[in-house]
Image (cartoon, helix red, strand yellow):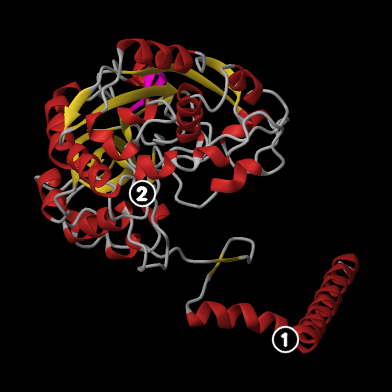
Amino acid sequence: MAVNFLHRLCVSVLHGWLYKCAGIRWMMSEEESGNMLLKPLKRVEEGNGESGENGHIRKKLKSVEPTGNERKHPKRKVVLLLAYSGKGYYGMQRNAGSSQFKTIEDELVTALIKSGCIPDNHGDDMKKMSFQRCARTDKGVSAAGQVVSLKLWMIEDVMEKINSNLPPQIRVLGLKRVTGGFNSKNSCDARTYSYMLPTVAFSPKDYYTKNSAAFRLEPETLQRVNQLFGSYKGTHNFHNFTSQKAAWDPSARRYITEMSCGEPFVRGGAEFAEITVRGQSFMMHQIRKMIGLVIAVVKGYSGDEVLKRSWGEEKVDVPKAPGLGLVLEKVHFDRYNKRFGGDGLHECLEWTEEEQAILAFKEEHIYPSIVETECQEGSMASWMATLPIHDFEATATGAQDKDREQDDEEGNRSDSAL
């Protein structure tokens, strides 16, 4: 009995001592770290967070309610087939914050907003709609088959509404759904350009250019022209056909699959011909310099050997033909079509059904603009008058930059997807 009494007494004393220690400990914690304990409680009370199982503070996620067209229409990744006449525009690419130099994309973005395809704030930051152009055509250059990829709201009669807000010299001719990760620039395998020029460009150098309308290209000369253009086929080092590109830069090597000049035809009383070139990619000025060098050889300013020499390491003075007449004809997506074109969900990015509309647009807007401007301004004749200042035989030490004015032409500068 005495043992039980002593046991109960010890337990009681021990409990009292533990309770006292715990109280002191709690008071010390509160005094020493009161501010630290109160801060989390204050944040929870203010609604800036909530306490988790371990006392950690977790931020509340704000839920954004869809508004406007987001409720009514689904947003989808699509491509648009664009045709435009480049006359009067400072190229394809939009210049953010610059309203002085109007571009094709300025017109397109404005039309997309007005038609309700994209929110207003997407016009200031085109990345928000995942916008990407396939080729960056420059000042005065036209296109019959430009392709851009973007996300937009699939409103009813989407193409008709976009076109109703575009000027007549810019048209959306096709629209197709694509995969979510599609990028029109990176997914492109090749581009095809055409270059329309008066055949007097291939006349002898002593030909009287003021009588250019009367000139007619001989079949033998056309054959020689195509032999020279044919030598561009394959992979070559085109460092002399662009600006600020070193001979040892691997990006200067470009692959050309086709280049030829078609049969001549008469428009506006003068004879013209159309050059077609297809390549995996092109650099700034490349197409115009390829054409300019062949013209110089045909006219007799240099021998045929200058072409091979221009692909070597030395600098060669290569003239740049005028920008008028250059047209982006078509962009090719062979790899994408092979992988996704037959999956039952996506269409092949071919535009056979739109071919008639493309041709009609070229006949109405692109060809007349080229012919009228050439006949009125004589840009080719003026350029041919500068050929004697080029030294084709000597190694050029910066001579190729004589014509480096920034009225650039074909599209994607030096990106591999052009």
For mark 2, what is the residue?
92
Vertical relation: 207 (above or below) 256: below
Vertical relation: 59 (above or below) 408: below
Q: Is residue 194 visible?
A: yes
- Magenta residues span 329-335
Marks 2 and 1 sit apart, C-alpha to C-alpha, by: 64 Å
Q: Is residue 410 visible?
A: no
For mark 1, what is the residue?
34
Residue 346 position, x and y percent, is 27, 25
Looking at the rendered structure, the kind of residue marked 1 is Gly
Q: Looking at the image, is mark 2 or mark 1 earlier in the sequence?
A: 1
Would you say 333 lies left or right of 27 here?
left
The answer to which of 351 and 151 lies nearer the viewer is 351
Residue 169 position, x and y percent, is 18, 48
Whether residue 166 is in magenta: the answer is no
Residue 170 position, x and y percent, is 20, 47
